[in-house]
Amino acid sequence: MAVVEVTAEPSGLYLRAALGLLPGRRPAGLPDLSLLRRGVPVDRDHLARYNRVCGFRLGDTLPPTYPHILAFPLAMRLMSAGDFPFPVVGVVHIANRITVSRPIDAGEVLDLTVWCEDLRPHDRGQQFDVHASAAIGDEIVWSGVSTYLSKSGAKGAKRDQPLPPAPTARWRVPANIGARYADVSGDRNPIHTSRIGARVFGFPRPIAHGMWSKARSLAALEGRLPAQYTVDVAFKQPILLPSTVGFTASAANDGWEFRVDGKRPHLAGVVTPP
């Protein structure tokens, strides 16, 4: 796999993403390429704004989901390139795994690497994984895998959904959370920020970012997570904005199981120790 070093944060990504909607031939496979950006610092003011939006306490330790947004511009550059097999506008984030190898202090400087692999069939199209890692020197301190779906138009079979358990907390998700999270994450997909943009992709109104709902769930478990762990989530039905949802968490196998539900399930996750 070729490695391309990026010396500055990528910009103009959503313009490139929009241009990717124009007709044209695309390759059949994922690019055999990884992007590397060295020496990425943490802006403490930005970190504080992110913590407020997602419900984390203010502090000097990075939330488990924060390196994801540091790596997001590299992921967008990779997926919005002309040699990517799908237009990035319209792909659906269906699952995410994060592994925290140790706590990361906000004063540490990170080397970020992003690449794609494992294009495979899904009953509604094709799915693929976007990997990201954060290293300090030779030590990988954080890694993430985001699974995306490119729909082919086929509809999956409907499944009966069991009634969710009684929630341990209820959250009021405000109408502006899409815009607020877009501001701190850089993920400005119009399905989260615009009623018109949401309708173009079949939603009656904007929807919350899946990674916001994951971050908000982990914020609810803050102080009860080990120093090292992996957290997997499956994103189910989107949270329409505004909404009231229920959060449920229970200790399980030295970790946690948690979920977010409204009238339909929105997210299911599990925290496992090393």
Image: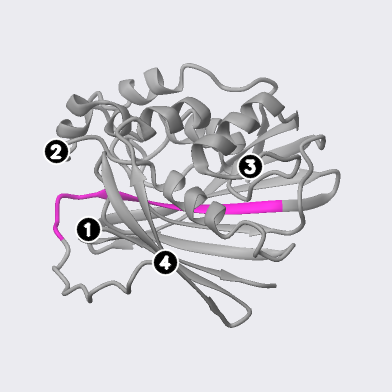
Foreground tag (1 vs 3): 3
For the stretch drawn in magenta, the main secondary structure is: strand
Image quarter of the C terminus: bottom right
Query: What's the residue type where badge 3 is placed?
Result: Pro
Query: What's the residue type where badge 1 is placed?
Result: Arg
Q: Secondary structure at mark 3?
A: helix
Q: Secondary structure at mark 4?
A: loop
Quickly name the residue at label 4: 168
Spatial separation of the CA atoms under disc 3 and disc 4: 28 Å
Point out the stretch of residues depicted in magenta.
142-155
Quickly name the residue at label 2: 204
Left or right: 98, with 162 as reference point:
right
Query: What's the residue type where badge 2 is placed?
Result: Pro
Instruction: Please state the horizontal and vertical placement of residue 104, each as a whole percent of the image.
Output: 76, 47
Instruction: Please state the horizontal and vertical placement of residue 243, each as a whole percent of the image.
Output: 26, 45
Spatial separation of the CA atoms under disc 3 and disc 2: 31 Å
Residue 207 is inside the magenta segment: no
Q: Secondary structure at mark 1?
A: loop
| Among the 4 quarters of the image, the one containing residue 258 | bottom left
Quickly name the residue at label 1: 124
Foreground tag (1 vs 4): 4
For residue 114, say whether it is visible. no
Spatial separation of the CA atoms under disc 1 and disc 2: 21 Å
For residue 64, say whether it is visible. yes
Q: Residues within 10 Å of mark 1 (few under 14, many from 20)?
A: some
- Residue sitting at x 72%, y 64%: 228
Foreground tag (1 vs 2): 2
Q: Earlier in the sequence, mark 3 or mark 4?
A: 3
User: Colour mode?
Assistant: one colour
Query: What's the residue type where badge 4 is placed?
Result: Thr
